[in-house]
Amino acid sequence: MRRGVGWNIVLGGVVLFFVLIITLPFWWVMSGSFKLPQEIIARVPTMIPQSFTLQHYVKLLSSSDYPTYMINSLVVASVSTLITLALSVPAAYAFFRLRFPGREALYRMILLAYAFPSIVVLIPLFGMFAKLGLVDTRTALVVINVSFALPFAIWMLRSFFGSVPMEIEEAAVMDGAPPLVILRRVMIPLIAPGIASVGIFAFIMSWTEYVFASVLILSDAKRTVPVGFSGIIGQYQIDWGLLLAGASLATLPVILLFALIGRWFVSGLTEGAVK
C-alpha cells in the first residue's frame, strides 16, 4: 500500500512538473501583455503583474493592421478546415469501404506529402500559382493548407471508420440505405470525435502557417497573423508589450475552438489510440 501511495505521489509530481512547463510560457505571455513597459523589462521579473494596463491592446488594435491580419487568418483557417473536412471524410470512407487495385499502396502514398520539407516545393508552387494568377490571394493559402492537411486527415479518419463495428453498417445496408446515406446518417455521427480532432488539427495548421504565407502574399492587406505580426514587431522596434498583446490575441481563436469542441478532440484521440 505504501509503495502504491508513493508511486502516485511521484507520478503526480511528474505530471505537475510537465503541466507547469507547458502552462508557464502562456501565463508569462498573457500576464506580460497587461504590464506597464517598465515592469516588462524590469531586471527582476514578476509572475503576477504589479501593474495593470490595456495600452498595449489599444495600440495594437488602433494603430496597426493587426485586426486585418486576424480577419485574414480566420477566413483562411476556417475555409481551409471546412474544405479539408469536406474532402477527407468521403475520401477516408472510400479507402475504408471500397475495394480497388492498389488501394493500400495509394493509401500509403498520400503520406508522402510529409516526406519533403515545405521549402523544397515552395518555388515550384510559387511558379504554378503565378501562372494561375493566384499569387497575393487568400485562395492560394487555402489551397496550400488543404493540400498539406488533407493526407493526414484521410489517414486519421480511415482509422476511425475502421473502429465502427461492421454490424452497424450491415444493418443499414439491409435496410436499403445507399452508401452516401450510410456515410451521412450512420458513419459520420459515430466518428464525430474523430472529425473534431481532424478539424482542430487542420485549423491550427492553417492558423500557424508561415512559410508559404510569407512568400505567396505580397500586399499588407492580405497578410495573415504570423506574417503580418512579424512586420509589426519590426515597425515598432520590438515593443515587448505590443508583442505580448499580439501573441495573446493570436492564441484566442485556438482556445475558443478547444473550449467548444475540446472534449470531442480528447475523446477522438483516446478512441483512436485504443481502437
Image: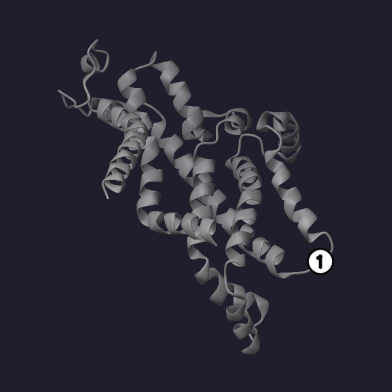
Q: Is residue 60 left or right of residue 169?
A: left
Q: Residue at x 24, y 26 (%)?
A: 55
In the rendered image, residue 150, in percent from the top left (x then y), is placed at 63, 50
**Visible in this render: residue 62?**
no
Q: Is residue 97 above or below residue 119?
A: below
Residue under the point 52% across and 66% down: 191
Neighbor class of circle 1 (other Cα within 10 Å; few <14, some 14-19, many 20+) is few
The image position of residue 262, as x and y in percent, is 39, 54
Q: Is residue 262 left or right of residue 54?
A: right
Task: Tell me where residue 54 sits by quadrant.
Answer: top left
Residue at the image position 64 percent from the left and 44 percent from the top: 148
Q: Nearer the viewer, residue 7 or 228?
A: 7
Where the C terminus falls, by quadrant? bottom right
Residue 139 screen position, x and y as percent? 61, 44
Query: Residue 210 location in percent, x, y?
Result: 55, 31
Q: Mark 1 is on which residue type?
A: Phe
What secondary structure is found at the residue carrying circle 1? loop
Name the residue carrying label 1: 100
Query: Looking at this view, is 13 or 229 the one in front?
Result: 13
Q: Is residue 76 visible?
A: yes
Residue 38: quadrant of the picture: top left
117 or 24, nearer to the observer? 24
In the rendered image, the residue lying farthest to the right is: 101
Question: Which quadrant would residue 188 be assigned to in this image?
Answer: bottom right
Q: Is residue 156 above or below residue 132?
A: below
